[in-house]
Amino acid sequence: MIDRSAFSNEAHAVTAAPWSHAHPRNDHQLVFPLSGGRLLFVWCAYYVRRPSAIGRTPFDAGAAMRDDAPCRIAARVSADRGRTWSGALTLQENHGADNVKHPNLLRLPSGRILFSYTERDAAAQRLRVRLRVSDDECETFGPSRDITPGPGWYFTNADHVLLHSSGRIVLPCHAGPIYGPGDHYRAFCLYSDDDGETWRESRVKIDLPERGAEEPAVIERRDGSLLALLRTSLGRLYRAWSSDAGETWSEPAATELDSPSVATCMKRMPGGDLLLIWNDTPPYAATIPGSGLTHQPRNPLRSAVSDDDGETWRNRRTIEDRFGYDNAYPSVTFVDDEALVGYYSTVRSGVGGMYGEVRLKIYPLAWFAERDPRPA
C-alpha cells in the first residue's frame, strides 16, 4: 500500500511569480507578515533590457538568465492568508552594476523592520550585503547602506535571518575571494547586537573540502546555541554548532541527509519542532558513473521534522516531485496553524535559468507531524 500521507497535501497552491517574456526568471522568495493580518510576498524578479530578448521562449538558445542578469526585488500583498495576491510592486530597484537579490526581512521587538539584500558587481568580483530600515510596515525605507565587513563575495539567502533570544541579529552567510571555476567558500554569519546599527562577522568560520561550506541555514537551539545545516558538494548536508551565538563555529560533521549542492530552509515551528525543507536526493555525481555534477538533481523537494533540535529527522513529506523540473531554494513562513512554503521551479528541458517561476503552497501544520490530519 502507498503511504499517501507522505505526498503533497496542500490546502492551497498558487504560482505567485509566473514566467513571462519580460520576467523570464523568478526566485529567492519569502513571505513576511505585516500588520492587519496582511502578508507580503517578496521575490527576485529578473528582467530583460534589450528588444531582441523580449520575444524569447524558454527553449531559445542563448536565452539563459544567469545569476548576474538584471534583477530587482518585487513584492505582492495578500489580505486572505495567501490565497490571493495583489499585482506586483517594486520593493527595491536595481542600483547594482548587475543586480540586487537575496531579500531578508526581520521585525525587531520595537516593531522596526530590517530589510537586507545583496548588490552584485561581477566585473569587480564583488557581492555586498546592504541594509535598509522601515518604521511604517514597509511603506517606506530609509537609505541603503553597505554592512559588508570585508572584500570579496558575501552571499546570503532569502528568508534566512533570525533574531537570537539574546537580542542578537544573526544573518547566515558564506563568502570567498572569487566567483567562478575554482571558487571555495567558508560559511559563517554576520551579527549585530545593536538592532542593526553595527555588524561583525564570525571569528571562526566553517570550512569543508571541494567547493567548501555554503549557504548555511541556522536556527537557535533550546539551550541558546546555534545549529547550522550546510550546502556542500560532498553529497550530504553537513552541520556545525556555535555556543556563542555565531562568533565561533565547530568543525563541521556529515549528517545522514543526502543532498546535491543546493540551499535548504530550516525553521522552528510554532509547536517547538524544527522543520527542514531540502532536496532529498543524492547528486548525480554519486549515482551516475562518470558524472561530475554535484548540484543536480534539484528534485524532489521534501520536508522532515526534528523534536531533538536537529539530532535526528523523521516524517519525510513530499512538497514537490515534478519530473523534468528543478524545484529548489525553499522558504517557509508560519501563519497561525498553517505553513506557507515557497520555492522556485525551472524546467530542465529548457534553457537553464530561463523558465523560472515561484510556486507557493499552503499546508496545515499538522501535516508535518507524526500522523497525517486527513484520510490517506
Image: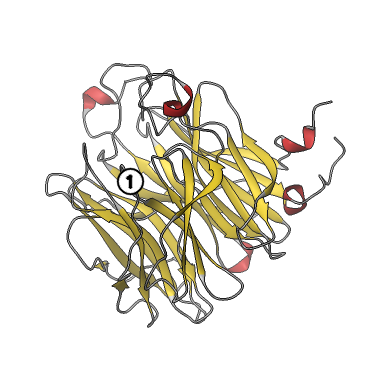
- The secondary element bearing badge 1 is classed as loop
Identify which residue is drawn at 48% across, 42% down: 236
Position of 250 relative to 185 (above/below): below
Residue 168 at x, y percent in the picture:
44, 78
Residue 235 at x, y percent in the picture:
45, 38
Please name the residue that numbered disc 1 is placed on.
209
Image quarter (top left, top right, bottom left or bottom right) of the C terminus: top right
Position of 231 relative to 20 (above/below): below
Position of 369 relative to 204 (above/below): above
Pick the front one: 261 or 238: 238
Image quarter (top left, top right, bottom left or bottom right) of the N terminus: top right
Residue 158 at x, y percent in the picture:
43, 53
Q: Is residue 127 left or right of residue 57?
A: left
The image quarter in which residue 284 lies: top left
The image quarter in which residue 39 lies: bottom right
Q: Which residue type carries mark 1?
A: Pro
10 Å neighbourhood of mark 1: few (<14), some, or many (≥20)? few
Identify which residue is drawn at 47% across, 34% down: 357
Q: Is residue 175 left or right of residue 191?
A: left
